[in-house]
Image (cartoon, grey):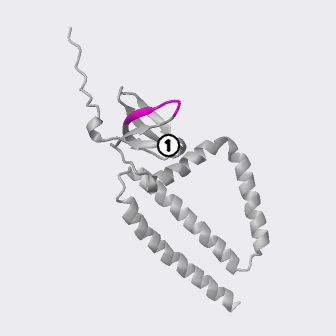
Amino acid sequence: MQTQVLLLLVVLGLYFLSGAAIRIFMRRVVDTKEAPNKRKALIKKVLGIVHLMVFIFAALMVLGIDYSNLVVFLSSTFAILGVALVAQWSILSNVTSGILIFFNFPYRVGDRIRVANKDFEMVGVIEEISTFHVMIRKDEGELITYPNSLILQTPVIKLPMTQKRVQKPEQPESD
């Protein structure tokens, strides 16, 4: 019993230490990204929830919850969630891709890119990178919403800014 309490205190201490390390990491990485504050808050929340779940699992293991019973419970829960969310799979895929894009996407808002899709090649400027999609303003002025999961699967080429089309402000019509 004393060993379990001691191990639980160690797990709790590791939780707080790793939480502090994650907060420092998040401050360094997230604050350097040019992303809306709403998106930064979402990334922080998702990482916080994952961190908490890992340590809840560790605490349950220390308390002596049978590993096989816990795995059966978790796999059953994930199976039910998987069946319930199968219609929303693309949304989950886009959210996950949005998190990956936040940390690893080599392009930023304002960059001129070409999405080299064999069916639909698109050239434009990135206007916004959100949780679900990337907004790209085409040279013709059209605003395209491109899903995050597709932009990770499609070759994206960064074009020099010298090729950027300068849009002239619209002139009011005179009678």
Q: Quadrant of residue 62?
A: bottom right
Residue for point 70% across, 80% down: 63
Q: Which of 53 and 132 is in front in this view?
A: 132
Q: Which residue lies furthest to the top in this view?
A: 175
Residue 88 or residue 100, whichever sits in front: 100
Q: Quadrant of the C terminus?
A: top left
Query: Residue at left 60%, top 72%?
Result: 55
- Figure check: 25 above or below 85: below
Give left or right: position of 101 versus 36: right
State the image coordinates of residue 84 (x, y, percent, origin top left).
71, 47
Residue 70 included in the magenta stretch of the image? no
Q: Nearer the viewer, residue 153 or 77?
A: 153
**Residue 119 within the magenta-colored segment of the rendering:** yes
Dot 1 surroundings within 10 Å: few (below 14), some, or many (20 or more)? many
Residue at image x 61%, y 42%? 90
What element does badge 1 sit on? Answer: helix
> In the rendering, at what x and y percent does residue 81 appear?
70, 52
Which residue is situated farthest in the bottom direction here? 2
Label 1 is placed on what type of residue?
Ile
Magenta part of the chain: 118-124
Residue 72 location, quadrant: bottom right
List x then y, in percent, for residue 166.
Answer: 25, 31
User: Where is residue 144 shown, x and y percent of the image?
Assistant: 44, 32
Give the side of residue 58 with respect to residue 157, left or right: right
Number of numbered discs visible in the structure rendering: 1
- Please identify the quadrant where the N terminus is shown: bottom right
Q: Mark 1 points at which residue?
A: 151
Vertical order, 160 against 143 (above or below): below
Left or right side of 171 for 5 = right
